[in-house]
């Protein structure tokens, strides 16, 4: 039954995220909001919505390690698992904005998280305010000074939906994400108890992969439609949102305190390492291009992470 809860939770999260995204894009088109705003706000937030809801609900229900493990594991899965699979399908040409804006901000956010956790093994209310404020500053900076750095996340054939469909997708998306997160948390925590596995281990593996599925779908669709760098931009943006918005908002609602020290001695170092390695693969072996070989390496790194975590 717990496994069924997890499967149903993943399914609802996938459909809920997709429905919410459709309604958000439709609303933006009807209000004539520029695509640049849609890409870095609505789309990025929508693909991070599963992580946000799972983390907030986990923290409120008293499972802080599941909340933190979900975000750290999701960031590792986004760059190791999702980007790795995407690169097996096609190469990705990288824009200059990757190393001038997007990647540095992802690393700054990751290092801020590391500092806060290393300092006292917790993310306090004030630290949550700092994380979320940095996100707002970053978005303002992009929109005012670095518009060319923002990758358009919207296919050209998107159209505004009728009002009733927009409202329907909005409601169904919200309910799907809420219901999916509830089922996922119940199934994951009960399974952890049954098998004697820690919340942190379930959050860092099963839950994090499940909440990265929207990013995987978005990246594969972008590759199929041959839109330059959308896949990489989506994943970098999602990682930034996961730390600054998901953990920021979660800790503002309820402080997050680390219970399983492996999050600090193992998991966060894998997140920092794979995040830094992306810069290397962008310049090697071909400058400003991520090759299929890099995809294989990223998948091997992710497999090594799972082995080191589970063993």
Image (cartoon, rainbow, N blue to C red):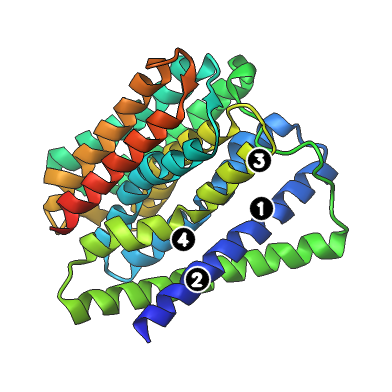
**Which residue is drawn at the image coordinates 42% and 24% (left, top)?**
103
Residue 217 in the image: x percent, y percent? Answer: 57, 50
Name the residue tied to disc 2.
180
Q: Residue furthest bottom?
A: 1
Residue 147: image quadrant is: top right
Q: Secondary structure at mark 1?
A: helix
Name the residue tied to disc 1.
21
Image quarter where the N terminus lies is: bottom left
Q: Secondary structure at mark 3?
A: helix
Q: Is residue 125 positioned above or below 40 on the image?
A: below
What is the CA distance from the residue labelled 2 to the residue labelled 4?
9 Å
Q: Is residue 146 left or right of residue 198?
A: right
Which is in the foreground here, disc 4 or disc 3?
A: 3
First along the sequence among labels 4 and 3: 4
Which is in the foreground here, disc 4 or disc 1?
A: 1
Name the residue tied to disc 3.
224
Q: Which mark is residue 31?
A: none
Name the residue tied to disc 4.
53
**Which residue is drawn at the image coordinates 49% and 20% (left, top)?**
289
Q: Nearer the viewer, residue 264 or 82?
A: 82
Residue 114 in the image: x percent, y percent? Answer: 22, 36
Q: Secondary structure at mark 4?
A: helix
First along the sequence among labels 3 and 2: 2
């Amino acid at each position: 039954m717990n496994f069924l809860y997890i499967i149903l939770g993943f399914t609802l999260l996938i459909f809920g995220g997709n429905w919410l995204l459709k309604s958000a894009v439709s609303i933006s088109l009807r209000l004539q909001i520029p695509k640049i705003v849609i890409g870095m706000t609505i789309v990025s937030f929508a693909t991070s919505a599963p992580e946000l809801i799972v983390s907030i609900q986990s923290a409120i229900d008293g499972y802080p390690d599941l909340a933190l493990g979900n975000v750290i594991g999701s960031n590792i899965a986004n760059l190791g698992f999702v980007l790795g699979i995407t690169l097996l399908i096609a190469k990705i040409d990288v824009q200059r904005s990757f190393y001038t804006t997007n990647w540095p901000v992802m690393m700054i956010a990751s290092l801020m998280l590391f500092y806060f956790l290393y300092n006292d093994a917790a993310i306090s209310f004030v630290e949550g305010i700092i994380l979320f404020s940095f996100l707002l500053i970053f978005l303002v900076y992009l929109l005012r000074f670095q518009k060319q750095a923002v990758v358009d996340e919207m296919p050209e054939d998107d159209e505004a939906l009728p009002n009733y469909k927009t409202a329907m997708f909005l409601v169904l998306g919200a309910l799907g994400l809420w219901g999916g997160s509830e089922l996922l948390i119940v199934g994951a925590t009960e399974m952890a108890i049954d098998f004697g596995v820690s919340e942190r281990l379930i959050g860092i593996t099963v839950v994090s992969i499940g909440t990265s599925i929207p990013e995987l779908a978005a990246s594969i669709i972008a590759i199929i439609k041959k839109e330059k760098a959308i896949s990489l931009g989506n994943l970098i943006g999602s990682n930034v949102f996961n730390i600054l918005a998901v953990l920021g908002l979660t800790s503002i609602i309820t402080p997050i305190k680390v219970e399983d020290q492996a999050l600090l001695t193992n998991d966060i170092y894998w997140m920092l390492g794979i995040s830094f390695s992306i810069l290397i693969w962008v310049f090697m072996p071909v400058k400003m291009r991520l090759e299929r070989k890099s995809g294989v390496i990223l998948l091997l790194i992710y497999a090594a992470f799972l082995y080191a975590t589970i063993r």
